[in-house]
Amino acid sequence: MKNFYRLILCASFVAFIALVGIGTALAGGPPALMTAADSKAHAANSEGIEHYNQEHWDVALGHFQKAVGADPNSAEAHYNLALALDKTDKHKEAAMEFKKAQNLGKDNPDIQNSKILLGHVKMLEGGK
């Protein structure tokens, strides 16, 4: 019987840790997206993702700006730049970057179905 209670306690603890982990991931916002390994934006984008995941918004912003500069046609780099701009309260700039990501990333469902992107683009288009 003692082992049964230990098992229940362990299972409860594991469930608690899983919920806390999920909550932490959700608190940080939508995940940043990887670029293709052969993209000129890949190195700067990867560095930006590391800082974004650590909630170093300004540092991530700088790396994502470099990524967009290295590959202006990378939908993922524009998307990530928009995420960082949103986190630094630059919502109009974020909306413009989300729109670029939407236009460039027609084949990327993570971009096309992003709620934060859709909300910003709607704001940019005057709430239509």
Image: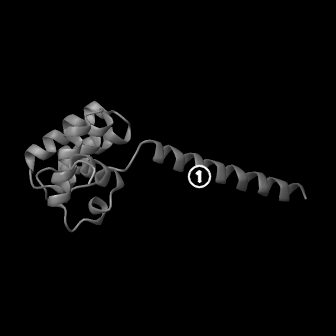
62 to 108, vertically: above or below: above
Left or right, 1 with respect to 31, comes to right
11 to 92, vertically: above or below: below
* Residue visible at 21% across and 68% down in the picture: 107
How far from the left and from the top, in percent, is residue 110? 31, 61
Left or right, 112 with respect to 55, comes to left
Q: In this orientation, does residue 115 appear? A: yes
Q: Residue furthest bottom?
A: 107
Left or right, 82 with respect to 21, comes to left
Where residue 85 sits, quadrant-wise, is top left
How far from the left and from the top, in percent, is residue 122? 27, 52
How far from the left and from the top, in percent, is residue 71? 9, 51
How far from the left and from the top, in percent, is residue 7? 78, 57
3 to 84, vertically: above or below: below
Q: Quadrant of the C terminus?
A: bottom left
117 to 65, vertically: above or below: below
Q: In this orientation, does residue 37 appear? A: no
* Residue visible at 38% across and 37% down in the picture: 54
Name the residue that disc number 1 marks: 18
Residue toward you, 49 or 97:
97
* Residue visible at 13% across and 56% down in the picture: 39
Name the kind of residue labelled 1 in the image.
Ala
Left or right, 65 with respect to 88, comes to left
* Residue visible at 47% across and 47% down in the picture: 26
Could you classify mark 1 by the number of other residues whose Cα lies within 10 Å: few (under 14), some (14-19), or many (20 or more)?
A: few
Element class at badge 1: helix
Q: How is the image coloured?
A: one colour
Q: Quadrant of the N terminus?
A: bottom right
